[in-house]
Amino acid sequence: MSYFPKPRPDRRRVRRWNVLWPATIRVAGRDYACTIIDLSELGARIAAPGIRYAPIRAELNSQHFGSLAGHFRWAQGGHAGLQFEATAEAVLQVLKPVVPGLGRRRQGLPREDEPSR
C-alpha cells in the first residue's frame, strides 16, 4: 500500500500560460479588480477575492489585450475559471501578440484538426 497520492492526469486540452497581469472583471454591470493568473486560447484563471461567482457572463479587461467575454465555469476560494465565448482561433489572434509562444501545441498531443491515434 502506498501512502503517496497517485498523480492526477492533466485533463487540459491546451497549454496554459502563467501571466500574473492586473485586470478588471465586469460582472452584472459592476467592475472588480482581479489578477489574471494564467490563460489559454480557451479561457483564463483569475484571482478576485471578495466577489461572488455564479455561472454567468463576465467580461475580462486587461491593458495587455483589451477585452474578452466569457462565462464562469468554476470558482474555489478567491479563484475562478472563465471560459471565453470567442473561438480559440479568434482568442489566439488577440493574445498571440502579448503572450509569446501562445498557441504552440504540447508535444505528443494531436492538434484539434488531427484525428486521434
Image (tube, grey):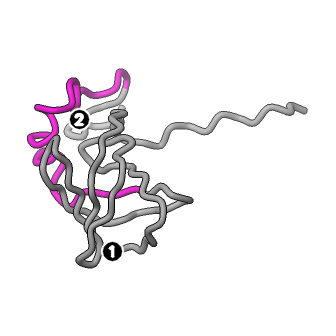
Mark 1 residue type: Ile
Mark with earlier residue (1, 2): 1
Secondary structure, mark 2, is loop
Nearest the viewer among 51 and 76 is: 51
**Percent of width and height locating residue 74:** 46, 62
* 111 horizontally vs 117: left or right: left
Find the residue positioned furthest to the top. Answer: 107
**Residue hosting label 2:** 114
**In the drawing, what numbered circle is on residue 19?**
none
Q: Residue at x 27, y 67 (%)?
A: 31
Q: Residue at x 27, y 74 (%)?
A: 30
**Residue hosting label 1:** 56
> Can residue 91 be found in the magenta stretch?
yes
Nearest the viewer among 61 and 14 is: 61
Please tell me in which quadrant of the rendered image residue 3 appears.
top right
Please tell me in which quadrant of the rendered image residue 22 appears.
top left
Q: Which residues are magenta?
A: 81-108
Q: Nearer the viewer, mark 1 or mark 2?
A: 1
* 34 horizontally vs 97: left or right: right
Secondary structure, mark 1, is loop
Mark 2 residue type: Glu
Q: Residue at x 36, y 31 (%)?
A: 117
Q: Residue at x 56, y 59 (%)?
A: 77
Nearest the viewer among 98 and 31 is: 31
> Can residue 63 be found in the magenta stretch?
no
